[in-house]
């Protein structure tokens, strides 16, 4: 099992739709989690951090389910500009060297 | 100007050639990283450095070496490039005091023929 797994997609949705991605992680002791956004041929950029039970930033909501070892990203009222690849990133447990573990990404296409 | 700058942005080379990718940052971060990205595989860590005297291997260090010349500079070398090192390479920095968020350079696209 990969340490961090994501559905590669693509998720193809119309503008205004609500879309959700899940990401599972294998190490139950992992402490912190992030969603990064990566546009085609560009560098990844931090979208949201997920530290406890989840958090919301405008149209974006990230949630953590420790019992089932997954995090989710919900995007409401999708915009064309939301088209990108979304990377799930997991921070190893304390005591490990600080090496974030990246999922392979979920691609989102928002159509007019 | 970008906070994390990578050079060159694009490079085409031949098998067996020595290649150096350079990274410089103006963020004042101690931690620097080199990743490679291949389609469908996500980002894989090659090497990382937590300060000038600290160099550590990542998941896929074979065939690569690094040099941390200063706090602001971290270079990646391919001593003898091979075609399966064709990839998009990213340098990144982080500061534990800023929550550990990674700040990436714009990437260096390397093609080995």
Image: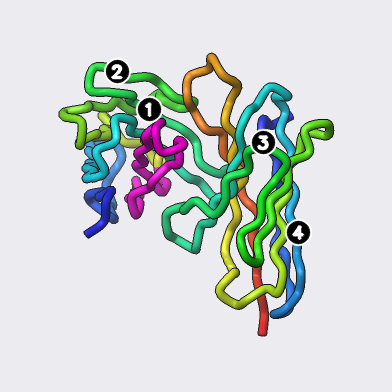
Distance from the alpha carbon under mark 2 to that under mark 1:
11 Å
Earlier residue among tags 2 and 1: 1
Q: Nearer the viewer, residue A83 or B99?
A: B99
- Report x, y in % for residue A82: 59, 69
CB within 8 Å, label 2 to label 1:
no
Q: Is residue A37 above or below residue B70?
A: below
Instruction: Identify the secondary structure beneath mark 2.
Output: strand
The boundaries of the magenta stretch are: B86-113
Q: Which mark is residue A4?
A: 3
- Residue at 57% across / 45% down in the picture? A49
Q: Quadrant of residue A25?
A: top right
Left or right: B83 with respect to A58? left
Distance from the alpha carbon under mark 3 to that under mark 2:
27 Å
Q: What residue sits right under mark 1 in the picture?
A: B47
Q: Which callout, 1 or 4, points to the residue nearer the camera?
A: 4
Distance from the alpha carbon under mark 1 to that under mark 4:
33 Å
CB within 8 Å, label 3 to label 2:
no
**Mark 2 belongs to chain:** B
- Residue at 33% across / 24% down in the picture? B50
Distance from the alpha carbon under mark 2 to that under mark 4:
40 Å
Task: Answer yes or no: are tags 1 and 3 on the same subunit.
Answer: no
Task: Answer yes or no: are tags 3 and 2 on the same subunit.
Answer: no
Distance from the alpha carbon under mark 3 to that under mark 4:
17 Å
Q: What residue sits right under mark 2 in the picture?
A: B54
Q: Which callout, 3 or 4, points to the residue nearer the camera?
A: 4
- Report x, y in % for residue A22: 75, 49
- Report x, y in % for residue B76: 28, 34
CB within 8 Å, label 3 to label 4:
no
Earlier residue among tags 3 and 4: 3
Q: Which mark is residue A20?
A: 4
**Mark 1 belongs to chain:** B
């Amino acid at each position: 099992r990969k340490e961090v797994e994501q559905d590669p997609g693509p998720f193809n949705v119309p503008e205004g739709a609500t879309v959700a991605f899940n990401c599972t992680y294998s190490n139950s002791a992992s402490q912190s989690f992030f969603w990064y956004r990566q546009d085609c041929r560009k560098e990844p950029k931090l979208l949201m951090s997920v530290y406890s039970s989840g958090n919301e930033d405008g149209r974006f909501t990230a949630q953590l389910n420790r019992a089932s070892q997954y995090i989710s990203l919900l995007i409401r009222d999708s915009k064309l500009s939301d088209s990108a690849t979304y990377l799930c990133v997991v921070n190893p447990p304390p005591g490990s060297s600080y090496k974030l573990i990246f999922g392979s990404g979920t691609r989102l296409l928002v159509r007019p | 100007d970008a906070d994390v700058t990578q050079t060159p942005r694009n490079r085409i080379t031949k098998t067996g050639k020595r290649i150096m990718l350079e990274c410089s940052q103006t963020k004042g971060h101690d931690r620097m990283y080199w990743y490679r990205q291949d389609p469908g595989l996500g980002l894989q860590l090659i090497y990382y450095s937590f300060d000038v005297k600290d160099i550590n291997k990542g998941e896929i260090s074979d065939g690569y070496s690094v040099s941390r010349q200063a706090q602001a500079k971290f270079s990646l070398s391919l001593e003898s490039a091979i075609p399966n090192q064709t990839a998009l390479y990213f340098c990144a920095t982080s500061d534990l005091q800023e929550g550990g968020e990674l700040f990436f350079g714009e990437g260096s696209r390397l093609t080995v023929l």
